Image: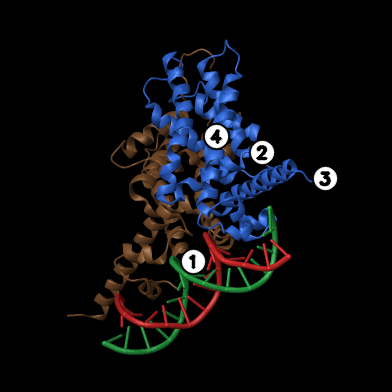
Chain colours: A brown, B blue, C red, D green
Amino acid sequence: MVTSATRTRKSEQTRERLLDAAARVFRDKGYAGARLSDIAEAADMHTPGVYYYFGSKEDLVEEVLRVGVARAAAFVAERVAAVPDGASALDRLRAAIEGHVLMVLEIGDYTSANIRIFGQLPDDIRQRHLAQQRAYGDLWRSLLEEARATGELRADLDLSVVRMLILGALNWTVEWHRPGALSAGEVARHATAMICEGLAAPGAPGT
Amino acid sequence: MVTSATRTRKSEQTRERLLDAAARVFRDKGYAGARLSDIAEAADMHTPGVYYYFGSKEDLVEEVLRVGVARAAAFVAERVAAVPDGASALDRLRAAIEGHVLMVLEIGDYTSANIRIFGQLPDDIRQRHLAQQRAYGDLWRSLLEEARATGELRADLDLSVVRMLILGALNWTVEWHRPGALSAGEVARHATAMICEGLAAPGAPGT
DNA sequence: GTCTATACACGGATAGAC
DNA sequence: GTCTATCCGTGTATAGAC
């Protein structure tokens, strides 16, 4: 029995399969380097089939970008919220660092695509996407400001610069981390350690 | 008077102007997104003129990549060598961090192009370039191992992961730093502080 | 919804004049 | 060495059958 409801569900599944494929191909080949035929093939369909679901390559990439930040923001916010009430602001920052790494390396094809292609997008697309990106940045901004307010953060650093250095270290993992080697959790542990406590040995000279 | 020598010099100047333009355009638009016509225009010539100096778009990008790592390696090595003899291994690491940031943000169109496009290159080009990149990685590897050997570095972290996290934080500055805002030197100061000493306030609880 | 066939623009590359 | 003209492959997008 094929009802209207099942047809709609199948259509939505196909659309999602297509989006998933697009995220992976964009991440691997870049925006200009990704061909619609590559994406269609990865989604087990032929090129014109893409146009049944999306009006253009631009529409497709914008949806990937939108989903990418939305998921990252939701996932990281959830992890931060899950930190016990008595914990310090620095602990919440650590939770955000861990969450971002896990999202990027384990569950976030859309987020990692976002990270890798954002810089090469045509100006108009990038401009349209900036607002959503800023919302995620605000999450980090408040985490850092909280920690500064409680005195847990050293006071001699500009928080905007710090925020971008942190996100840089984390985002760059997309470029070098290969699944099967070190686990995402281990990468996250290294990141929180370096960012929060620093590399220098506690009692070492010159620190 | 137009001698053979002056003609050769002019030719080399033009070739260099072309390479400079290619580095900027590749950095801004990515590999696939950069058109030879964009590059030619930025170098004040017409598209076919490019083929007098380079056999193909691939040749052109490979030369940009080659120059990019070579300059970064030379510049950072020089800065590390300039650190006074009595200084600690951690001080040499700090010098490398500063040098890398300055190269990327102030003098290194080739290096920043390298950073931004490496991930989107066709496999064969990337493969050919990996060896040169590894040589630069070795410089960082030995700096970290030295600091570990002298006990200046905490002992619970994998140095390969640490190396990539550091380079990630530094390389990502290409994505967000805009000249005219914060100076490259200030960015470098933030990077050395966060990486070596960490963000946590010295006497704060929970560290 | 998904197929085949195809229009059409664009970009890399070459030819050949000057 | 640099120009104009042009070839040709490729990739986005559409038309229209099923």
Mark 2 vs mark 3: in front: 3
Q: CA distance from mark 2 to mark 1?
A: 33 Å
Among numbered discs 2 and 3, the one appearing first in the sequence? 3
The answer to which of B164 and A34 lies nearer the viewer is A34
SS type, badge 2: loop
State whether residue B25 appears in this view.
Answer: yes
Q: Horizontally, is D5 left or right of B206 in the view?
A: right
Residue A149 can be seen, yes or no? no
Q: Nearer the viewer, residue B173 or B84?
A: B84
Which residue was labeled with disc 2? B182
- In front of the other: label 3 or label 1? 3
For residue B82, what is the image quadrant? top right
Q: Position of residue B93 (x, y in %)?
A: 52, 23
Residue sitting nearer the eye, D8 or C5 = D8
Amino acid type of the residue that numbered disc 3 sits on in the rendered structure: Met
Q: Secondary structure at mark 4?
A: helix
